[in-house]
Image (tube, rainbow, N blue to C red):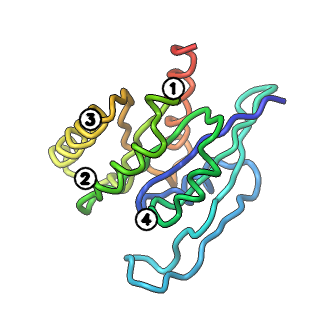
Amino acid sequence: MNYKKLAIVGEIGAGKTELINTLSEISPLQTEAESSIDIGKQFTTIGIDYGRITLGDDTALGLYGVPGQERYSFLWEFVNTSLWGILFLIKFGESPNYNNLDKLLSFFCPHKMKTACVVGITHCENADKGDLVALGVEIRSMLDHHHIVAPIINIDARNKTSAMSLLHSFNAINKYSS
């Protein structure tokens, strides 16, 4: 069986753990702990969340969710090898942490590593279309700064069909670039 890796990174509360729970065919490994500071939610990921999904008769995809805070960059290093793809999740509704996104894009460096990447915007089910467009423009500017060409997709990490649309995007990108 062929094994591929997908890194899922993003800011606190962007939906990394939820996405892995939605997609994984196995009982996911979760590394959440109660937050000691106010981050807007009770629990946060402090290690690597892991799930797996079958892509075809002979291919499995490992889903590696890592915290987006720079203090966890040692986990980024562990995951950032032989990646099939990198998914950057951004939470809609609050001002995104563009400095953090810049650091993630610089570290994972999909352009130089020739790794497919997709940006998923979460928590946008009830968003104003104009606000989503404005966020997309800001994200596109950041991607351009890093010489990254990637689709930006609005998703609901709780919905399997929506979550699968991300994997379809990666599959199309990887087929096109092969």
Q: Where is residue 23 in the image (x, y as percent from the top left)?
A: 63, 47
Q: Name the residue under label 1.
A: 114
Q: Where is residue 95 in the image (x, y as percent from the top left)?
A: 23, 60
Residue 136 shown left or right of residue 41 in the figure: left
Q: Rounded to the nearest whole Å, what is the CA distance between mark 1 and mark 3?
A: 16 Å
> Residue at left 52%, top 76%?
43
The amino acid at mark 4 is Gly
Q: Name the residue under label 3.
A: 145
> Residue at left 20%, top 44%?
129
Sequence-wise, the earlier of marks 4 and 1 is 4
Q: In which quarter of the image is the C terminus?
A: top right
Q: Rounded to the nearest whole Å, what is the CA distance between mark 4 and mark 1?
A: 28 Å
The one nearer the camera, 138 or 81, is 81
Q: Rounded to the nearest whole Å, what is the CA distance between mark 3 and mark 4?
A: 25 Å
Q: Residue 127 shows which numbered tag?
A: 2
The amino acid at mark 1 is Lys
Mark whose residue sits in front, 1 or 2:
1
Q: Mark 4 points at which residue?
A: 13
| Mark 3 neighbour density, 10 Å: few (under 14) some (14–19) many (20 or more) | few
The amino acid at mark 2 is Ala
Mark whose residue sits in front, 2 or 3:
3
Q: What element carries label 4?
A: loop
Q: In this view, does 22 lie above or below 108?
A: below
Q: Position of residue 5 (x, y in %)?
A: 66, 39
Sequence-wise, the earlier of marks 2 and 3 is 2
**Which quarter of the picture shows residue 39?**
bottom left
The amino acid at mark 3 is His
Sequence-wise, the earlier of marks 4 and 2 is 4
Q: Is mark 3 on a helix, strand or loop?
A: helix
Mark whose residue sits in front, 4 or 2:
4
Q: What element carries label 2?
A: loop
